[in-house]
Amino acid sequence: MIDFAGGRPVALDGKPAGLCELIGALNLRAGRYGLGRYSGLEHIDSGEKVLEVREMPAACLLLHAYRQLESATVPAETMREKLSLEQAWTREAIEGRWFGSLRAAAQAFVMSVAERVTGRITYRLDRTGMTVLSVEARDPLYIRDRDAWERDTARSSCHFSTA
């Protein structure tokens, strides 16, 4: 169980935790199942490629949890624009324009979207991966009672004429 407040992870299993403590605990939990392991070819300046292996179990879990909660709390149109601005932010940072206005504007937008991302994600971790068991958002955009919603929608859209 990972709790987020304003886009930041703040608790693990319902217990408040600082970011370093949370990362350490998640590295152990997710790492024991091999989650967050990456291997691939890295392109280097000379045109050659080198095999690279990275392990980032906590980051893998935290990023996935954030995206799940974000999708529950942020409108789809805003998410689409945010994804584009995340790419711009990355490009600006990698290309050395950290102090540029585009990077600053992209970061301001991303941070403003993160303010809505508050809630809890519960996972089951095993050798096959990570499975989301529940998403509980503070201000959800999702329907909590689908049966009631379908009944109400059907009732409001059915207008029969008796003539």
Image (cartoon, helix red, strand yellow):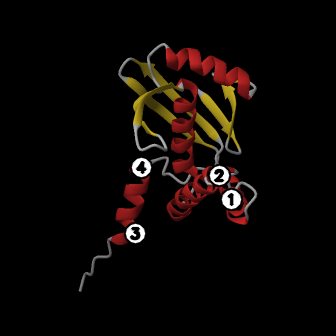
Amino acid found under the numbered disc labelled 1: Arg
| Mark 3 vs mark 4, CA separation in Å | 15 Å
Amino acid found under the numbered disc labelled 4: Arg
Q: Earlier in the sequence, mark 2 or mark 1?
A: 2
Whether residue 22 is visible here, answered yes or no, is yes
- Label 2 or label 1, whichever lies nearer to me, is 2
- Label 2 or label 3, whichever lies nearer to me, is 2
Asked whether the beta carbons under mark 3 and mark 1 sit within 8 Å of each other, the answer is: no
The furthest residue to the bottom: 163
| Mark 3 vs mark 1, CA separation in Å | 47 Å
Amino acid found under the numbered disc labelled 3: Ser
| Image spot of residue 75 (x, y percent) | 54, 60
Q: Earlier in the sequence, mark 4 or mark 1?
A: 1
Q: Which numbered marker is on residue 146?
A: 4
Asked whether the beta carbons under mark 2 and mark 1 sit within 8 Å of each other, the answer is: yes
**The quarter of the displayed image where residue 63 is located:** top right
Viewer-nearest residue: 108 or 158: 108
Q: Which quarter of the image is occupied by the N terminus?
A: top right
**SS of the residue under disc 4:** helix
**SS of the residue under disc 3:** helix
Q: Which numbered marker is on residue 156?
A: 3
Q: Earlier in the sequence, mark 2 or mark 3?
A: 2
